[in-house]
Amino acid sequence: MSSSSSSAGGKPLRCPICRKEAVDAYRPFCSKRCADIDLAKWFSGSYAVAGREEDEGDSAASADSGRRPDGDDDDA
Ligand SMILES: [Zn+2]
């Protein structure tokens, strides 16, 4: 016995980005580059969702603000 490799089984992990064989250092990715790409995806995804939610709330508040409950000044 010289070096101990993966003990889980004989199934090599595949990089979810480019489908190459993953390396231990960057599991489950094959390289730092693919790990960075995945990280960027996560960041952009969460930012997009947060932005959308904020926009929706802003729109509803704006519509509500347009109404004027006490507009009887003109009536009298
Ligand atoms: Zn990769």
Image (spheres, grey):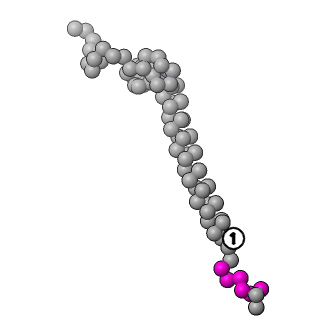
Q: Which residues are magenta?
A: 69-74
Residue at the left extreme, as displayed: 1
Q: Nearer the viewer, residue 15 or 75?
A: 75
Quarter holding the C terminus? Answer: bottom right
**In-image side of 46 versus 10 (left or right):** right
Task: Depth check: give the residue in front, 24 or 2.
Answer: 24
Q: Amino acid at mark 1?
A: Gly
Judged by its main secondary structure, the magenta piece is loop
Q: Is residue 73 magenta?
A: yes
Looking at the image, which is closer to me, 60 or 75? 75
Quadrant housing the N terminus: top left
Viewer can see residue 61: yes
Closest to the observer: 37 or 10?
10
Side of 6 where 25 appears, left or right: right
| Relative vertical location of residue 27 with respect to residue 45 in this rendering, above or below | above
Would residue 61 be counted in the magenta stretch? no
Q: Residue at x 64, y 60 (%)?
A: 59
* Mark 1 burial class by Cα count in 10 Å: few <14, some 14-19, many 20+: few
Q: Secondary structure at mark 1?
A: helix
Position of residue 64 relative to residue 21, above or below, is: below
Which residue is label 1 attached to? 66
- Report the residue that reaches farthest toward the top: 1
Which residue is rendered at x = 76% and y = 87% of the image?
Answer: 75
Q: Name the spot of residue 6 as percent of width and height, x first.
A: 30, 18
Task: Find residue 67 and report its horizontal and vertical position in percent.
Answer: 68, 73
